[in-house]
Amino acid sequence: MIISDALQLFTESLSAVYDKDEIDSIKYLVLSDILQTSKAKLHAFPDEKLDEATVQKFQQIIQKLQTGEPVQYILGHTEFYGLPFKVNPSVLIPRPETEELVEWVLSESQKLKVKSQKFDSILDIGTGSGCIPIALKKHLPQTQVTSVDISAIALQTAKQNAELNEVEVQFIEADILNPTHNPQLATRNSIIISNPPYVTEHEQLEMHTNVLNHEPHNALFVPDNDPLIFYRVIADFALQHLEPNGLLFFEINENLGKETIELLAGKGFKNIELRQDMRGKDRMIKANL
Ligand code: GLN
């Protein structure tokens, strides 16, 4: 088998599971990862011969992809904000929308540094793979970055990712919905950020099976009758734990922009700003006390 045959095999084998564009991105991702080469080289040398072990590896990967298992879990890693992250089914796969949120936080933190004497700490709530706090710490090395997650197993992955990216982030295992007194969480922060679960049970019905059957439900889903449960609790927490000039950032459910703004306004937050993601969906919010 040569490279072009392998590419063709991915296309034929996955047509029932993914659309053409997704197959294209998946197949180049897999081949460049396994062959440790670039997409450009795959293009340039389509006649390169593949050894038997590599062909077998591709066949195993195709079988997993056919079950809907996300390619990032199969390969065990992904990229977020230009940085490498290990991923496994205990953590949500970092999304490109969340990179846009990180971008916003970084640009606002520059302004906050100028405006405020004190810009020194960030708290991330519901950290998962650690993608948000690690990307922020990488770009704000002077800032103390702390992150919280309910899942001990997710935190193990997040810690590995902090090591992989050579940054120091403090990790705390805690349930933000039932916070017992935790002295590490008692301090005030310059920024509080969260990408909490926000997909309603109802919206599950429209989800692709590769998300639904493979990604952690405790990172994704909220009850239909209380879809903003995390936003309410985290906003209350922020009222107590933000510094006077501090900022609160959320990734949000694209269908709940108005409701999330109302919730924050009702709690007294000011300068509430809603932003769309690159697909034009209401996706993130910033507010201050
Ligand atoms: N954006 C993710 C998705 O649609 C959900 C992330 C979350 O619930 N925080 O799969």
Image (tube, rainbow, N blue to C red):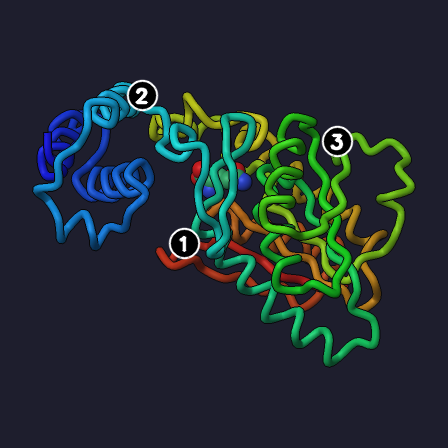
Observer-nearest of 102 and 227: 102
Q: What residue is shown at x 59% (from left), y 42% (from top)? A: 161
Q: What residue is shown at x 40% (from left), y 35% (from top)? A: 72
The span from disc 2 to disc 1 (Cα, nearest Å) is 31 Å
The span from disc 3 to disc 2 (Cα, nearest Å) is 33 Å
User: SS at mark 2?
Assistant: helix
Q: Mark 3–mark 2 contact, CB under 8 Å?
A: no
- Please name the amino acid that badge 3 sits on: Asp
User: SS at mark 1?
Assistant: loop
**Residue 156 coordinates in the image, percent (x, y):** 66, 31
Image quarter where the C terminus lies is bottom right
User: SS at mark 3?
Assistant: loop
Circle number at residue 175: 3
268 horizontally vs 85: left or right = right
Q: Relative to residue 255, is residue 273 depicted above or below?
A: below
Among the two numbered marks 2 and 1 on one chain, the one whose residue lies closer to the N terminus:
2
Query: Mark 2 sits on what residue?
Result: 64
Nearer the observer: mark 3 or 2; the answer is: 2
- Please name the amino acid that badge 1 sits on: Lys
Query: Mark 1 sits on what residue?
Result: 281
Among the two numbered marks 3 and 1 on one chain, the one whose residue lies closer to the N terminus:
3
98 horizontally vs 117: left or right = left
**Residue 261 coordinates in the image, percent (x, y):** 60, 55
- Please name the amino acid that badge 2 sits on: Lys
Quadrant in the picture for residue 239: bottom right
Circle number at residue 15: none
Q: Mark 2–mark 1 contact, CB under 8 Å?
A: no
Image quarter where the N terminus lies is top left
Among the two numbered marks 3 and 2 on one chain, the one whose residue lies closer to the N terminus:
2
